[in-house]
Image (cartoon, helix red, strand yellow):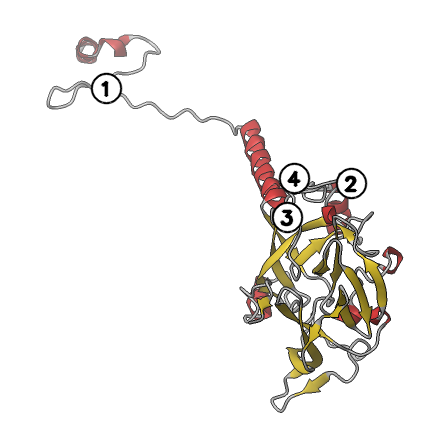
Amino acid sequence: MKEAALDGKESLENPAASRVGATPVPPPGNDGSPPTITTAPVRRGTDWWGEVKGIFWLVLVVLGFHSFIAKPFYIPSESMLPGLRIGDRLVVTKFAYGWSFVSPTIPNPVAIFKSVVLRQQEDSWSVQIPFIKGRLFGSLPTRGDVVIVTPPGTQNDYIKRVIGLPGDRLEVRGGTVILNGVPVKRGPVHDTLIPVDTNSPCSEDEYPGARETRADGAMICRLPTITETLPNGRRFDTIEMGWSPGDDYGPITIPAAHVFLMGDNRDRSADSRFALTQLGLGGPVPYENLGGRAEFITFSLDGDATYNPLTWWGSLRSDRAGTSLHPATAN
């Protein structure tokens, strides 16, 4: 009877508790305030469609930035020594001369798979759209600019310097560039000292006799250098290793909407002086094939870095970061 009485008393104080399956209602607080009912949060599954859309828009923004604003560029060769070395990473602005058919960055999944997974050599990770004449908001580069160029009929990217503009009469004699009948001013020969590392080996085949060992054991590459000054006063250093097949060229008249490009490492550069079959640019290049202007070096690696992050810092060439790629102007 006592238990029954107690049950009956509880049922009177909390009627909802007497119903089978009913959710108990908590008693009121000591101060007479209404009871607080806490409900467990409802767990929802992952919104996979939302995740996919987020990734899609992120990729689209990155590709748009690469196509229309700027993109990174890696120096793969020594054709622009002494200013640019293998391992340098650059920023290239895509809008400097307007936009053309080479501007869009369209990933090629097949090429990426072959390069990353199968370790096969691929010319490019991008798909290139067919040639379209003209540029959107187009303008010609300034003589002396360092530019990214795609050789006609290929998907490769080269980096060279603008030497000749439309209408110029250009020739090369004994290694000296002659523009409109006037030889480009060349300073005296002086040496550029480049530290030897994995990315800058200074091989005997390419630079005979240039490799030296200092008293402290450090190895350097001593390269004969000549400073050139273009008609607009812009000056830059070039490497002069002696006679090479590109030391004599032309004369030619550069067609409209074309530019003549050369590497600063004059005797080790496949550029406008050489045919496409020689991995050159095949003469003056349509300005539609210019992909952008090189601005500055972001960082540079000596080639000793591995997938181990602990090796990255030691591989940095600390003196390269921030170097401007705009040539100085003579007084």
Q: Which secondary structure, mark 4?
A: loop
Pick the front one: 130 or 247: 247
Q: Tell which circle, 1 or 2, labels the residue nearer the N-terminal end.
A: 1
How far apart are labels 3 and 2 at the CA level? 17 Å
Which is more foreground, mark 3 or mark 1? 3
Q: Tell which circle, 4 or 1, labels the residue nearer the N-terminal end.
A: 1
On screen, residue 316 versus residue 203, left or right, reads left
Q: Which secondary structure, mark 3?
A: loop
Q: Amino acid at mark 1?
A: Pro
Q: Amino acid at mark 4?
A: Leu
Instruction: Return the x and y of residue 99 as percentages of the image width and height.
Output: 65, 43
Q: Tell which circle, 2 or 4, labels the residue nearer the N-terminal end.
A: 2
Q: Callout 1 environment at 10 Å: few (<14), some (14 to 19), or many (20+)?
A: few
Q: Amino acid at mark 2?
A: Phe
Q: Are marks 1 and 2 in contact (CB under 8 Å)?
A: no
Instruction: Return the x and y of residue 227 as percentages of the image width and height.
Output: 66, 75
How far apart are labels 3 and 4 at the CA level? 9 Å
Q: Are marks 3 and 1 in contact (CB under 8 Å)?
A: no
On the image, numbered disc 1 is attached to which residue? 26
On the image, numbered disc 2 is attached to which residue? 131
How far apart are labels 1 and 2 at the CA level? 76 Å
Q: Amino acid at mark 3?
A: Tyr
How far apart are labels 3 and 1 at the CA level? 73 Å
Q: Which secondary structure, mark 2?
A: loop
On the image, numbered disc 3 is attached to which residue? 97
Q: Which mark is residue 136?
A: 4
**Image vertical order of residue 54 relative to residue 163, above or below:** above
